[in-house]
Amino acid sequence: MAKERDDADAAVRMICAAHGDDEGPLIPILHDIQASIGYVSDTAIDTVADELNLSRAEVFGVVTFYHDFHRAPHATHTLKVCRAEACQAVGGRDVWAAATEAAANGSGEVGVEAVYCLGNCACAPSVQLDGRTLGRMDAERVSALVAADSGAPS
Ligand code: FES
């Protein structure tokens, strides 16, 4: 356990060092930590504060302000479902309901999150699976997507 913690701490310190010459490196560092470890832990916040000579509260405030940063281990796959106007106007509510239901019935491998516009309004309703934007979604397609990534037959 202690070794895992040390490894994670070393990884965070390496990420900080890689951004050593950047101007305003906090957000890029937090993105890299999340990409590498999956979330931004309390320990990572302490380490980043130490490396950047910031207070813990400053780093914590940034992490909790932005919804994209997770504070705890997250599902393997992330499905973002747009809940903004253009998507709501063409069936986004049904897509959200189907996605959350499929995720609740799945293996927990897919985490469903609400987002408020993916810039794909012309092809609404839109979702984003692990960064890949998909338009013209409907309840059936989104359920199949979640089931496929949950390892369940779709
Ligand atoms: S409102 Fe859903 S992608 Fe813009």
Image: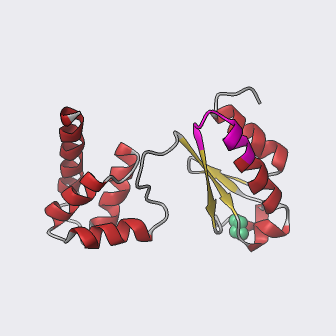
The answer to which of 34 and 136 lies nearer the viewer is 34
User: Does 76 appear above or below 13?
Assistant: above
User: Does 30 appear above or below 66?
Assistant: above
Residue at figure coordinates x 35%, y 44% from the top left: 37
On screen, residue 37 versus residue 47, left or right, reads: right
Report which quarter residue 127 is drawn in: bottom right
On screen, residue 37 versus residue 92, left or right, reads: left
x then y, percent, for residue 99: 73, 48
The answer to which of 1 and 111 lies nearer the viewer is 1
Residue 24 visible in the picture: no
x then y, percent, for residue 26: 29, 66
What range is drawn magenta here?
101-110
User: Does 114 appear above or below 78?
Assistant: below
Which quarter of the image is occupied by the C terminus?
Answer: top right
Residue at figure coordinates x 80%, y 43% from the top left: 141
x then y, percent, for residue 11: 23, 44
Report which quarter residue 89 is drawn in: bottom right
- Is residue 127 a member of the stretch shown in magenta? no
- Is residue 106 a member of the stretch shown in magenta? yes
Ligand 1 falls in quadrant: bottom right
